[in-house]
Amino acid sequence: DGGITQSPKYLFRKEGQNVTLSCEQNLNHDAMYWYRQDPGQGLRLIYYSQIVNDFQKGDIAEGYSVSREKKESFPLTVTSAQKNPTAFYLCASSGIGTGGNEQFFGPGTRLTVL
Amino acid sequence: EDKVVQSPLSLVVHEGDTVTLNCSYEVTNFRSLLWYKQEKKAPTFLFMLTSSGIEKKSGRLSSILDKKELFSILNITATQTGDSAVYLCAVENNAGNMLTFGGGTRLMVKP
């Protein structure tokens, strides 16, 4: 089955800790994305990557870091510098084309800071 | 800065009603507009619109784009309780394949 997987489903973090959220896709998509969603709000872009070993900051990159060592994987690290990390994190992937690109989403990771 | 505004913020209807959800946008170098449905977790894709005036339809859901007036609507006819969800609108620009999302419309359909 093709799709996007995220782990863990739920994550609890103590203040001052870094945590890494996993995202893997087997859709052979070139582009991958990380979004943050707060209660009652839409999605905000944290980072995105269109090719291996390259990524760009989105609208709210401060306090986060990513890597793209493999096409299939785009892990997100929430660092201690992120002041309000409690949120729902969604990973997505898409092809790259000129006719419009649907993004496919993983099931999400809900991060809670204790 | 690209911007997407959805209205209403929330909506409560009864089964069988018809609803219209609105999405207006400002985006540099528009490529496409997408609608997603989000129930508990991951948004699921509904429609992608790239051309004005062409209605996309899937069962009881339909959507149309007006590129001149910069908006789209999503219609749901004969609503069912299973339509209860947050509906998200997003626009894609030509630079970087990024999506800018609106804040969503929360629809509740009562029996």
Image (cartoon, coloured by chain):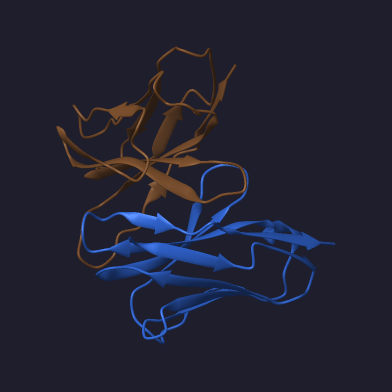
* Position of residue A67 in the picture relative to residue A107 (left or right): left
Is residue B68 in sight in this rendering?
yes
Residue B98 position (above or below residue A72): below
Task: Give the x, y percent position of residue A103.
Answer: 36, 52
Is residue A27 in sight in this rendering?
no
> Where the C terminus of chain A falls, by quadrant?
top right
Among the chains, which one is brown?
A: A
Quarter holding residue B103? bottom right
Task: Give the x, y percent position of residue B18.
Answer: 71, 77
Among the chains, which one is blue?
A: B
Residue at 64% across / 68% down in the picture?
A: B8
Q: How many marks?
A: 0
Residue A98 position (above or below residue B51): above
Relative to the observer, which residue lies in front, A27 or A24? A24
Task: Give the x, y percent position of residue B29.
Answer: 24, 70
* Position of residue B18 in the picture relative to residue B101 (left or right): right
Residue at 52% across / 44% down in the picture?
A: B42
Residue A17 position (above or below residue B75): above
> Where the N terminus of chain A falls, by quadrant?
top left
Quarter holding residue A97? bottom left
Task: Give the x, y percent position of residue A37.
Answer: 51, 42
Quarter holding residue A27? top left
